[in-house]
Image: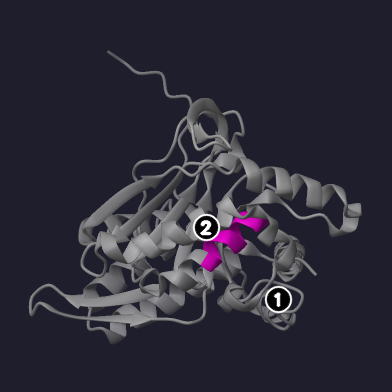
Amino acid sequence: MKLNVTNVEYFGIQRKMVAAMTSESWYNIPHVSFVYEPDISGFFEEYKKLNAEKSEEDKFTFNTAMLKVITEGLKAAPQMNAHIKYNPHTIRGKITTYENINISMTMILTNGEMMTINLHDFHNKNITEMTKYIKDVRRRMEQSNLNEAMYTVSFNRTVNTIKQGRVKEAVLRIFGAKVGKCKIDTLKGKEKKAYHAIPETERLGDKDIEQGTITISNVGSLDLSQRGETTLLEIIPPQVCAICMGAAQDRAVVKTDEKGEKYVGIGKILPITIAFDHRALDFQDVVPFTRKLDEIFKHPQIIREWVD
């Protein structure tokens, strides 16, 4: 039976990079996934009150508020903010933990495609500083040739592959990028020189697209009415952890009144999926993270201390 084809789309560089990284993730990393479901009712209300007090220019998104929450959680569980190097043949490995929290976060481009951006040094930024940083990234993104930016990062990864002795793999990557229907078109000659002459204060550079120390996604922002939650989440090597937020949902929850008696009420639940590399982490390493978030959501007024 003949099938009626509606569309054929060959991989561009964005899809190639996603395919390469996620394939490596599932081939090599033993994933453990845990769905944490805190009641954020009080925190969400405090966020809305605080934002209502601000001018339009100074308002911040709930996503940015949650990036701050998660950053505080990572400070309590630093092992989650790490990279791993492991040789399965010799069974030798090394885990490097970082003080700097550089968040790889997916952003939606004006053409509808997605791109992962490295948000640097969020461990020492408050919400106001985070908001300004993200706004500046979006400004520079609009003025960037994204194919060129991603190709530069991809090329650097290919060079590292050669340095690691994986020459055949590198040659095949170059062939796939430059030959056939999946060929990647990049700037050439004077156009290329002129583009790279633009300072990185005005466009995205390598450091904006390179791997961060941890990946955080917010699929909830794509559809605020969704009722589900992420259960499988890929960890991007060499990172040891990935976090994904869903959409906040009204659910029946058990509450405690002033007399200490329990009753069923309505709470705003935010599903947060935590995936970690079992070669580097055990569940006990994640417990301080969720406990810190529990503490924040129990005392939501802390959000006011995080804003200038």
Which of labels 2 and 1 is toward the front? Answer: 2
Residue 107 showing in the rendered view: yes
Residue that sits furthest to the left in the current view: 90
Q: Name the residue at 71% across, 76% down.
A: 195
Q: Name the residue at 44% across, 79% down.
A: 156
Q: Residue 169's spot in the image, x, y percent?
A: 25, 70
Q: Name the residue at 59% across, 68% down.
A: 148
Q: Residue 219's spot in the image, x, y percent?
A: 53, 43
Q: Which mark is residue 254?
A: none
Asked if residue 66 lies in the magenta stretch, the reply is yes
Disc 2 marks a residue whose amino acid type is Glu
237 to the left or right of 259 = left
Q: Which element carries disc 1, helix, strand or loop?
A: helix
Please, is residue 46 above or below residue 172 in the view? above
Q: Of label 2 and label 1, which has the lower sequence position? A: 1
Q: Residue 174's spot in the image, x, y percent?
A: 37, 69
Q: Residue 74's spot in the image, x, y percent?
A: 47, 68
Please state, as top left, top right, bottom left or bottom right, where the N terminus lies in the image. top left
Q: How far apart, in angstroms, are the residues tagged by discs 2 and 1?
A: 48 Å
Residue 176 showing in the rendered view: no
**Magenta span:** 64-72
20 to the left or right of 134 = left
Asked if residue 166 lies in the magenta stretch, the reply is no
**Magenta stretch secondary structure, dominant:** helix
Residue that sits furthest to the right in the current view: 55
Task: State which quadrant residue 28 falls in.
Answer: bottom left
Disc 1 marks a residue whose amino acid type is Tyr
Residue that sits furthest to the front in the current view: 259
Q: Name the residue at 58% across, 60% down.
A: 69
Q: Which residue is mark 1?
A: 195
Q: Which residue is mark 2?
A: 295
